Image (tube, rainbow, N blue to C red):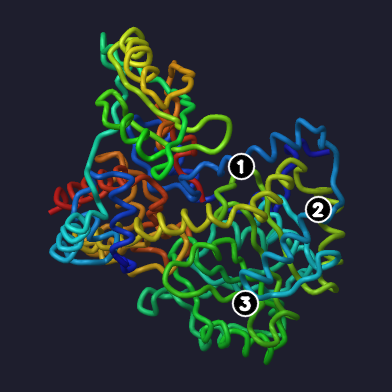
């Protein structure tokens, strides 16, 4: 027998690229006095009454498993929430699954619908996990690029150009991480027409739905005829400032939901029980907190977008989420060069746009989920950095 | 005065931090600096914004001797003027910081400030209890201030997030 060393890691995982964010994390984590605009989560701590509900559930001894799909009381609250906030109707008993963050919702959705070789259209720039998750589920990610000149919105023609017989679904995220772009009702309708015409599903990542600043939010599933073809992914992380609780949910018609529940039940059993009790409190009494936070993000968005434009980094006004995505092309640097030199020279961490896909090149993602003082200081340092380039 | 959306935003920003620069407020609410200045002036003239004050943690100041007490006061109301007359007699004292008419087991809740416990005790025994309408007083000294008017005095503001995340 030949004595070549056996590799234990699968070919698929071996070939998976590590996230480009990791490198920046390592660089920034070792530095002192860094102002970070690189954080993809709220700067608010979870409101106290929500934390208190989890503490109380622990005190009362609710420490065992819940049903696979999550506590029925929570699913009922989610159904009511989705109806009243987003005008979409799902049955709490068989069309809603409580998951471990929105990430696991996307994961079980993909693993449920994909046969080997099935294609999923992924609109980039996008969350770093989309493409790897499609590949891990045995699918093929077909990337289409939302372009800066279209305000980072994908056009129906671009989608139609990549549709094949193997197209099973398209993944969209609105408001978007990293661009903050929000799709309007008519833009969603354009997408819906294609989904109907070519008979594919839409995986709608609506995790930032609460954070819409100018227009009222429209859910993909609220578009005529789309309830049947949408897998709606959402959760508590962004709107309720609950990232560390790892709690999301997925809504889909019963045929898909019951299949997803099999994947969820074998892979994860159920989401964390104390987090579920916290989420019930969030939905019952958290509305004023969300409204306060939205107001605060909106002010900071206005501040940072105008400030970027003033210091010479062209920045479109994002309609939602908490990211600004200014262009750094005027500096002549690539987004990686810009982000790395800015970090080393001025101690400001941002995320280079190309880690979210090719069309993010030439941009940096700046989270404005930081205090106004921090944002002011960051802008000051970025300006000094740009001036030093000339 | 009915405030428009922008004015309301300005008041909310200033209520949280009265020292926010006008230029920053202008950016946050989407007005020009001049418009923002005018709005603030109007709010001040109409006494929507009454005053800009600082919240001071006097316990940080060495040898600052201030003490505060909350005093529950039972009084006899008077025909025609109810509690108002006695309330006025009490709130005119400089030592008195606040006076509230309360529901429940006593009538007036007053907050008194003094340089020492002795000074507050003297005020209660010499000035307050001797008023004709005052039936009884119960004095509670404040030992430590954790939160005052919505402001937490020693907040844990540490950013607990990891530096870069997707």
Residue A172 coordinates in the image, percent (x, y): 58, 71
Few, some or many residues within 10 Å of mark 2 (<14, 14–19, 20+): many
Q: Is residue B60 above or below residue A233?
A: above
The subunit carrying tag 1 is A
* Mark 2 → mark 1, Cα distance in angstroms: 21 Å
Q: Which residue is pictured at 46% across the width and 26% down the height?
A: B73
Give the residue furthest to the bottom. A197
Dot 3: few (<14), some (14–19), or many (≥20) neighbours within 10 Å? many
Q: Position of residue A241 (x, y in %)?
A: 55, 49
For disc 2, the marked residue is A70
**Residue A65 badge:** none
Marks 3 and 1 sit apart, C-alpha to C-alpha, by 31 Å
Residue A195 as seen in the image, left or right of residue A75: left
Determine whether the residue tagged by mark 1 lies in a helix, strand or loop. Answer: helix
Q: Look at the picture and state if B162 lies above or below B13.
A: above
> Which one is in front, A280 or A185?
A280
Q: Which mark is residue A49?
A: 1
Nearer-the-camera pick, A360 or B22: B22
Q: Which mark is residue A220?
A: 3
Label 2 or label 1, whichever comes before in sequence order? 1
Residue located at (67% from left, 69% from top): A140
Q: Quadrant of the N terminus of chain A?
A: top right
């Amino acid at each position: 027998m030949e004595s070549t060393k056996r590799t234990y890691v699968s070919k698929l995982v071996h070939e998976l690229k590590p996230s480009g964010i990791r490198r920046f994390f390592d660089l920034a984590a070792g530095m002192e006095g860094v102002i970070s605009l690189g954080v993809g989560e709220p700067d608010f701590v979870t409101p106290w009454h929500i934390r208190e509900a989890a503490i109380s559930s622990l005190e009362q001894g609710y420490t065992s498993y819940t049903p696979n799909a999550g506590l029925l009381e929570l699913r009922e609250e989610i159904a009511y929430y989705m109806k009243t906030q987003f005008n979409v109707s799902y049955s709490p008993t068989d069309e809603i699954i409580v998951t471990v963050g929105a990430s696991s919702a996307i994961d079980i959705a993909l693993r449920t619908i994909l046969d080997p070789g099935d294609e999923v259209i992924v609109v980039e720039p996008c969350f770093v996990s989309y493409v790897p998750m499609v590949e891990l589920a045995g699918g093929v990610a077909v990337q289409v690029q939302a372009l800066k000149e279209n305000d980072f919105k994908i056009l129906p023609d671009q989608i139609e150009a990549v549709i094949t017989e193997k197209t099973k679904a398209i993944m969209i995220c609105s408001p978007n991480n990293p661009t903050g772009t929000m799709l309007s009702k008519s833009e969603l309708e354009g997408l819906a027409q294609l989904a109907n015409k070519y008979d594919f599903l839409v995986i709608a990542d609506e995790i930032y739905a609460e954070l819409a600043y100018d227009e009222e939010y429209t859910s993909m599933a609220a578009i005529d005829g789309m309830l049947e073809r949408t897998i709606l992914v959402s959760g508590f992380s962004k709107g309720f400032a609950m990232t560390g609780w790892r709690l999301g949910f997925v809504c889909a018609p019963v045929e898909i939901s019951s299949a997803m529940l099999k994947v969820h039940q074998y892979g994860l059993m159920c989401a964390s029980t104390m987090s579920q009790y916290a989420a019930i409190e969030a939905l019952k009494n958290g509305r004023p907190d969300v409204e306060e936070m939205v107001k605060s993000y909106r002010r900071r968005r206005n501040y940072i977008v105008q400030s970027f434009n003033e210091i010479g980094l062209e920045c479109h006004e994002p309609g939602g989420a908490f990211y600004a995505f200014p262009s750094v092309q005027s500096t002549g640097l690539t987004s990686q060069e810009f982000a790395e030199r800015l970090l080393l020279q001025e101690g400001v961490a941002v995320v280079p746009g190309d880690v979210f896909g090719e069309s993010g090149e030439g941009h940096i993602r700046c989270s404005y989920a930081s205090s106004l003082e921090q944002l002011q200081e960051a802008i000051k340092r970025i300006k000094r950095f740009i001036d030093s380039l000339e | 005065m009915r405030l428009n959306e922008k004015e309301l935003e300005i008041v909310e920003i200033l209520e949280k931090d009265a020292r926010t620069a006008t230029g920053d407020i202008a950016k946050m609410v989407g007005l020009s600096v001049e418009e923002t200045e005018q709005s603030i002036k109007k709010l001040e003239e109409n006494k929507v914004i009454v005053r800009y004050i600082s919240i001071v943690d006097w316990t940080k100041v060495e040898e600052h001797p201030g003490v505060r007490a909350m005093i529950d006061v039972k009084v006899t109301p008077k025909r025609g003027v109810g509690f108002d007359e006695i309330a006025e007699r009490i709130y005119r004292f400089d030592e008195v910081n606040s006076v509230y008419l309360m529901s429940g087991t006593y009538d007036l809740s007053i907050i008194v400030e003094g340089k020492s416990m002795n000074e507050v005790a003297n005020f209660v025994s010499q000035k307050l209890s001797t008023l004709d309408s005052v039936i009884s007083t119960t004095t509670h000294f404040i030992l430590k201030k954790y939160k005052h008017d919505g402001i937490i005095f020693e907040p844990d503001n540490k950013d607990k997030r990891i530096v870069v995340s997707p």
